Image (tube, rainbow, N blue to C red):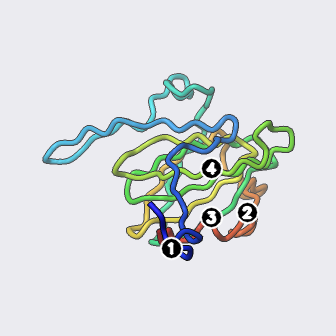
Amino acid sequence: MKLDEKAQTALKYQYYTNPPTPEGVVFQPLIKQRALEGAFMEYLRLKDGRVEGLPVPFEARQFSISWAVPGRINAFHLHPKRIQDELWCVVQGALLVWLVDVRDDSPTKGIKRSFLLSGEAPALLYIPVGVAHGYRAGHQGALLLYAMNDQFNPSDPNEGRLPWDFFGADLWADDKG
């Protein structure tokens, strides 16, 4: 079909293939059993402190919860002092999560990838050390449950911050398409 020149110039196409994922990142859907009276879901199974069923070794050393108000942007952070991998799961609401590989020796250095985590379709998102991570909460806010393989030390925090727009403010822009 022939379009007028103005429409043809402005036309963009949306593609549905997954972009590349930073090396070591794992996205693993969980099973949420639903019934009329509620729902049940297993978050993690541990054996000797290690998470079972995850394709990477992960020893849980601390569990934390973060509540995000609607629209909250919490980005970007890294854990450069000590190895701290994280395992995220949204149990209520939704988060748009951006991951950016900033490991100098990584074959996927510079790769940016977004994931939608939600309580409707829960999943585990494993974030290895050296992958910058941040999120934007959806219109209902979100409840994030996460595990770490290092414990927070208030006298020597391992939470490095980059500006929220370090990789481009467009990452957090609303989709107006």
Question: Rounded to the nearest whole Å, what is the CA distance between mark 4 and mark 3?
Answer: 10 Å
Residue type at numbered disc 3? Leu
Q: Earlier in the sequence, mark 4 or mark 2?
A: 4
Q: Label 2 belongs to which residue?
A: 167
**Residue drawn at (75%, 40%) of the image:** 108
Which label sits on residue 171?
3
Which one is nearer the viewer's eye here, 72 or 173?
A: 173
Question: Rounded to the nearest whole Å, what is the CA distance between mark 3 and mark 1?
Answer: 31 Å
Question: Rounded to the nearest whole Å, what is the CA distance between mark 1 and mark 4?
Answer: 35 Å
Do callouts 3 and 1 mark residues in contact (Cβ within 8 Å)? no
Q: Earlier in the sequence, mark 1 or mark 4?
A: 1
Q: Label 1 belongs to which residue?
A: 4
Q: Earlier in the sequence, mark 3 or mark 1?
A: 1
Question: Rounded to the nearest whole Å, what is the CA distance between mark 4 and mark 2?
Answer: 11 Å
Question: Rounded to the nearest whole Å, what is the CA distance between mark 2 and mark 1?
Answer: 35 Å
Q: Secondary structure at mark 4?
A: strand
Give the foreground label among 3 and 1.
1
**Residue drawn at (48%, 68%) of the image:** 3
Where is residue 73 drawn, in percent x and y? Answer: 58, 69
Q: Label 4 belongs to which residue?
A: 113
**Residue drawn at (26%, 38%) of the image:** 33
Q: Quadrant of residue 40?
A: top left
Q: Quadrant of the N terminus?
A: bottom left
Do callouts 2 and 3 mark residues in contact (Cβ within 8 Å)? yes
Q: Residues within 10 Å of mark 1 (few under 14, many from 20)?
A: few
Residue type at numbered disc 1? Asp
Where is residue 49 drawn, in percent x and y? Answer: 56, 28
Question: Rounded to the nearest whole Å, what is the CA distance between mark 2 and mark 3?
Answer: 8 Å
Where is residue 71 drawn, in percent x and y? Answer: 49, 72
